[in-house]
Amino acid sequence: MNIHKKILIPLLCLPLLSTLLTGCWDARELSELGITSGSAYDWENNQWKATYQVINPSSGSSGMGGSTGGSTSSPPFVTFTVKGRTIMEAIEKTNLTSTREMFFSHSRITVLGESVAKHGINQLIDMFLRKQDARETVYVFITKGEAGNILDQLMQLSKNQGAGVQLMIEQESRLISYYPGVQMFELAMALSSESGSAVLPEILLTGTEIMDETTETGRTDLKTRLALGRLGVLKGDQLMGWLSQKQAFGLSFMTDKIKTATIAFSSKPKSGDKPDASYILQKSKTIVHPKWEQDHYVIDIDIKGSGVLSEVGSVMDLNDRTSITEMEHSIEQQVLELVNNSWKEIRTLGADVTGFAVRIHRSDRKRFKQIKKAKNWDSTFQEIEIRPHVSMKIERTGLSNKSFESVHEK
Amino acid sequence: MQALETILSCRQNKELKTGDNNAKESRFQQNRGVMMANKQKPARKNASVPSENSVPAPLPLDPSLEVNLQELGKRIGQSSDVVFRRFTNESLSSLALAFVYIDGLVNADVVNQTVLQPLLETVTLKSESITATDAFRMIKDQILPIGGVKEGKTLEALLSMLFDGYTLILFDGLQMALAADTSGWEKRSVNEPTSQGVIRGPKEGFTESLRTGTSMLRRRLKTSDLRIEEYKIGQRTQTGVALVYLDGIASEQVLKEVRRRLNAIHTDSILESNYIEEFIQDGGLTPFPTIQNTERPDAMAGGILEGQIGIIIDGTPFALLAPSTFFNFFQSSEDYYQRYDISSFLRLIRYGAFFVSMLLPALYIAVTTFHQEMLPTTLLVSLAAQREGVPLPALAEALLMELTFDVLREAGVRMPRTIGPAISIVGALVLGQAAVQAGLVSAAMVIVVSFTAISNFVIPSLAIANSIRLIRFVMMFIAATLGLFGIMSFLMVLLIHMAGLRSFGVPYLSPVAPMVPRYLKDILIRVPLWSMTMRPKTNLGKETRRQGPDQKPKPAEGKNSQESGQPKPQGEDPA
């Protein structure tokens, strides 16, 4: 009996000891957390200037209209702007002004100001990869002016602005495919790959005024909205230039990033170049095949796609096979033009955002090693000749055979 | 004291040789119990056990009726419900007789019509020439129209029969007495089981009467293999305990072990099946039950058919089934009364509910205090918004609500039925709604606690549901200190503990660990009955066939083609 007691008493005391531990370590109550939904970085006076967007839970920014204490007058998020010689120094300084501990795990977007992009972003990427609660899956954007302003802008339909922007870019890359959303790890991978270049979508304010007051979101047509713009091209860790949306679209074809896209084309190329029909590209596959020809690389780009006709503005009988073939030709021409256009700009920028270096490295390792050794990849890149082959198929023509224009003519 | 008892029991044994059927059984068991106890722990012999001699020396009857009656009266202490009826009228007969019975334990009509009336009316008894021995023989063999008539030679034997509702007939000048079975007391009628209801299936449950229980099983298992062994356990209560099993299907080893443990019980009283359960179940300190209890004769019959051993205890409608594995507690008898697909689905839900009930509050605490990154942002924000005004940390909040629920639950059990609705209103409205509005607890916590509570009721066996009620609190503390890591670690500890448990030699987690794939047919899901051809050996027993191999219902095509196939070749051959 006594032996039992001797064992039992310490055993019973063990759980009691554990209660002393509660609250220690990294336990954090929800009400102590500053849930960060986005961050922005600028470079100013040789210092990092970081802006954090912290969700204000009691304003019901869950989007579901949190039932308790939801007051619409308080902003769905608040922003803190801090400066520091290093990024972490800046982050830690938020604790001087904020009542809550920054919590980065729910961060959705990171906006880089042009100033940072020009200064170099290696340090930032390193911080994201190193820090425990920083997510590598944040979407990275670049903006022309000051990045902090982007985070101040209120959004309609989505109170959590960071999450809203994430939805925007995801929708864009799924439905229009001008450019894919770039997450932090993808950026890091692209910059560390053989080509050493990456692209970042631009985010911008459509107006000059920043809508940062909750009363202002009461309007139906905001003066200023957030919008996705061009595509920034980075080489090394610096911003080289921009691709327009069209050029970015061409790049998407070259890099096989098309999910769904709408292409406007001229249904009767002979009678005019004016686009009067639309085609929804539903499936697209690009195969890139580099080969060495005498003194330069030739890249075969096979683009195969299929989709649906969604709009015809000319007199056309779709029962006629030839008219379909003609339209397919026109679409192919359209794509070809996009690709060539894009390539021209990329070549001028001299940044291998197409990932050709990776392809060449994989298919022709010996020569690529030589090029690397000789450090003349840039000139090799300039000499690359691309040969795009496009084949587009119209699989269905929608619900009507003749275009309404032709019915109307009769 | 033990030594004394052994001596006494030897004396008893000698006596037993000379007869006395009824006493034989109970005494025999007792003696065995005593001897087993001695064998098991010889060290105890000299230990100072509270010396309470509850088995007095058997006292042979005295030839004198008066002495016997006096002795009986002394033993019983003139309790008002004991009826002594002297039957000595010199004018009628020279024979002095006395009846003793306990009012309330006997059926008054039976006593009057089958004992008193025949004795009073029989003429031969009134003749003067008859001797006591002749009268004894005559009454026993001819006069009493009663099935159970026994002889008793010692006072103790008679007393125990008296308490079973027998009517004693004592003779002057004889050292023997007759006992007529006139038992008949108020019993609860067979009702629907209150704790284990089903939608489809038999609606009768065990009652407090042992005999009713065994008869219900007999009615279900009409086979000569059904064995019912009776024990009397408890020195003061002399509670009848029946061991019910199927000979040849129940494992001999398990049976031996159960008998050994039952015999080893040395206690004052057995008032409910839990007394037996606690005395014989394995793993005394484990939170997990290793013996099932059931109120349903059909569930019991099912268990017995699978090789389990049933233990019915007089005085309680809850019978025991052993050996029981962890998975037995998730099988409801209704699983077999419904289609197999819905049964399988329900069974999966039960396992799910088991984990929810055990882990949900702990997971809530762990996720909201350690792993906020695991939640979807919108959920996190809305949780954060709810917790904004709550003064307590998540652990305290969860503990508060869980304890509140347990208080409510206990109140619900104890409280008189008429004020039941009042408690549910107070519980649901005041504590749930108002506490959230007052900002004492968050709405999410109320949801977590209610879902946990409801999940707990999904588990068919109250025994295992209760065990995780306690584990839940441990889990909550661990979650608050170590987060998900702690939960996983503690689950490991639990799993190791469970893997080490045994129920009468059967591994607690069998047939999952140790894994016997072909016995999994009735564990996580229930396969169709025709596919369960073999009876899972309750591990230590043998595997026996339960039904024919090709029981899957199908059209009689095969048979037809056989029948029509015979003439066919004849017709085809010439062609």
Image (tube, coloured by chain):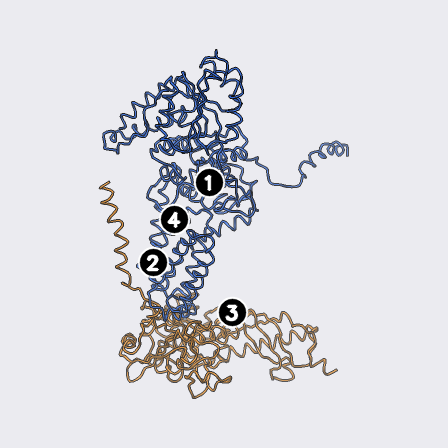
User: Could you tell me the amino acid type at mark 3?
Assistant: Thr
Is residue B368 positioned above or below B189 on the image? below
The label number, if any, that marks residue B467 in the structure image: 4
The residue that label 3 is drawn on is A286
Report the chain holding disc 2. Answer: B
Q: Which-is-in-front pick, marks 3 and 2?
A: 2
User: Looking at the image, which residue is at 56% across and 35% down?
Assistant: B547
Provide residue B427's location: percent of width, then percent of height.
43, 60
User: Could you tell me the amino acid type at mark 4?
Assistant: Ser
Say which element carries label 1: loop
Provide residue B177's location: percent of width, then percent of height.
43, 20
Q: Which-is-in-front pick, marks 4 and 1?
A: 1
Q: Which residue sits furthest front?
A: B91
Nearest to N terminus: mark 2 or mark 4? 4
The label number, if any, that marks residue B284 in the structure image: none
Say which element carries label 3: strand
User: Could you tell me the amino acid type at mark 2?
Assistant: Ala
What is the CA distance from the residue labelled 3 to the residue labelled 2?
A: 50 Å
Q: Are marks 4 and 1 in contact (CB under 8 Å)?
A: no
Chain in blue on the image = B
The residue closer to the viewer here, B37 or A65, is: B37
The label number, if any, that marks residue B317 in the structure image: 1
